[in-house]
Image (cartoon, rainbow, N blue to C red):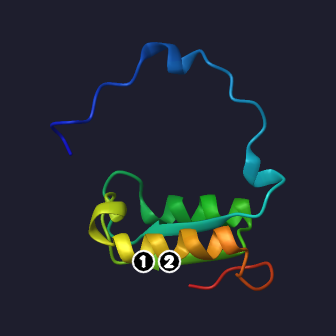
Amino acid sequence: MALTQKPIAARCFDDKSGPPAWKVKPSWYQVSANDRMIPPETERWFADRMKPKKTITLQASHASLASHGDDIVALIEEAAAGSAGGKGQAA
């Protein structure tokens, strides 16, 4: 992954994004318990603010998409189907 990742474009710091979708749309969230880029406590704080329909915690690093692909796909499929029951979190 390090060989293909490119530096961020400087203009990204000037672009305006508008209101975050998680404020008005249902969301699902995944915490990486072994993340050394974003502290897991910070990830949980993000999730608490978002109030997602579902939060999962994986024993994964920052690269959870690569190391836990099946779990991530299952979460995305659940989100796409809207099948997570009720508001709140499941860990």
Residue pictured at 53% horizontal, 78% vertical: 56
The residue that mark 2 highlights is: 74
Q: Residues within 10 Å of mark 2 (few under 14, many from 20)?
A: few
For residue 69, above or below residue 10? below
Residue pictured at 26% horizontal, 35% vertical: 5
Q: Amino acid at mark 2?
A: Ala
Instruction: State the separation of the CA atoms marked 2 and 1.
Output: 5 Å
**In the rendered structure, are the residues bearing label 2 and label 1 in contact, judged by CB atoms less than 8 Å apart?**
yes
Give the side of residue 80 with respect to residue 7, left or right. right
Residue pictured at 33% horizontal, 72% vertical: 68
The residue that mark 1 highlights is: 71
Quadrant the C terminus occupies = bottom right
Residue farthest toward the left in the current orientation of the protein: 3
Q: Amino acid at mark 1?
A: Asp
For the residue labelled by badge 1, is the local secondary structure a helix, a strand or a loop?
A: helix
Residue 69: % across, % down = 35, 70
Residue 87: % across, % down = 79, 78
